Image: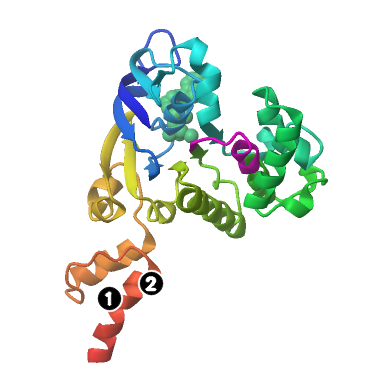
Amino acid sequence: MIEIKEVTYSYDDDSAHLALDGVSLDIEQGEFLAIVGHNGSGKSTLAKMLNALIVPDSGSVTVAGMDTADEDRTLDIRRKVGIVFQNPDNQIVTTVVEEDVGFGPENLGIPTEEILQRVAKALDAVGMTEYAKSAPHMLSGGQKQRIAIAGVLAIQPEVLVLDEATAMLDPIGRKAVLEIAKRMNKERGITVVMITQYMEEAVIADRVVVMNGGRVAMQGTPGEIFRRGDELRAIRLDVPVMVELREKLEGLGLLGESNALTVDEMAEEICPLLLKN
Ligand SMILES: Nc1ncnc2c1ncn2[C@@H]1O[C@H](COP(=O)(O)OP(=O)(O)O)[C@@H](O)[C@H]1O
Ligand SMILES: [Mg+2]
């Protein structure tokens, strides 16, 4: 779906400090990809490459075969790849929820009749139908973020990028956003790229990419990545709490090599041990 080849990018002209430093990555159609990395590792720069908000200094990004550096294709690319950013307040542009959700499709020149249908469908998908006539600034952070997602869904993208879209939310808002992303991926086959600081959120992905210093430091399934706790900690990242517990139990010789990543999986590993004793 998206091919990133040897991409470098610098925000300053002298290019001494590279925000992206030789990144290559393929994003498969229909996959749920998590991207993790500490602050400044290049995640947002990479996200902005995905819908031509910025283009590489060298190397290339192609979306469904379209080069993001080709300005004639920018609109087509933005129809395919929608991004939700961290701060919900910065993504609200109008004073009524339904107008806000319709803003993206309107900018892409979709006929009004169809916009209305898309807005209704998008609000339904994020569970915000009853707020269609509300004022966005009256909503909670999580609700605003669901509106922002609806705005992207109304574009009917093939790829949904969430750039730390859960970072400013409370646990309930975070969970709702995560659930929507999962559902859009499973039910509609939308490719999801979820950038997150929360390792627990990366656990649900098909694949995890770890960024460090503008490069891809590691990639693999959550099971593979979270076996490498020491390497993650060396680049200032955490592991999910359950992985920490697993490491402790393995270290104490109480648990053989385990792949548990979630509370449920850990319970399944531990219960037989408890019953045995
Ligand atoms: N608008 C900008 N102007 C100058 N430097 C920037 C800008 N945005 C990001 N950077 C720099 O680029 C690097 C990568 O940043 P970013 O992609 O935002 O990382 P992340 O999203 O992982 O925190 C950092 O060193 C950051 O300071
Ligand atoms: Mg960022």
Disc 1 marks which residue? 269
N-terminal of the pair, mark 1 or mark 2, is 2
Q: Residue at x 62, y 38 (%)?
A: 87
Taking the image as drawn, is residue 277 in sight? Answer: no
Q: Which image quadrant: the N terminus?
A: top left
Q: Which mark is residue 185?
A: none
Which residue is most to the top? 13
Pick the residue in front: 238 or 160: 160
Residue 156 among those drawn in magenta: yes
Vertical side of 54 occupied by 143: above or below = below
Q: Residues within 10 Å of mark 1 (few under 14, many from 20)?
A: some
Task: Find residue 35 and report its horizontal and vertical position in percent.
Answer: 39, 41
Q: Dot 2 lies on which element? A: helix
Task: Find residue 2 and report its horizontal and vertical position in percent.
Answer: 37, 29
Q: Residue at x 29, y 27 (%)?
A: 24
Pick the residue in front: 173 or 10: 173
Q: Dot 1 lies on which element? A: helix
Vertical side of 226 occupied by 67: above or below = above
Taking the image as drawn, is residue 41 in sight? Answer: yes
Q: Say if disc 1 is inside 8 Å of ligand 1.
A: no
Q: Amino acid at mark 1?
A: Glu
Which stretch appears magenta? 149-159
Q: Quadrant of residue 13?
A: top left
Task: Find residue 7 and report its horizontal and vertical position in percent.
Answer: 33, 20
Q: Residue at x 28, y 86 (%)?
A: 274
Q: Quadrant of residue 156?
A: top right
Disc 2 marks which residue? 264
Vertical side of 265 occupied by 127: above or below = above
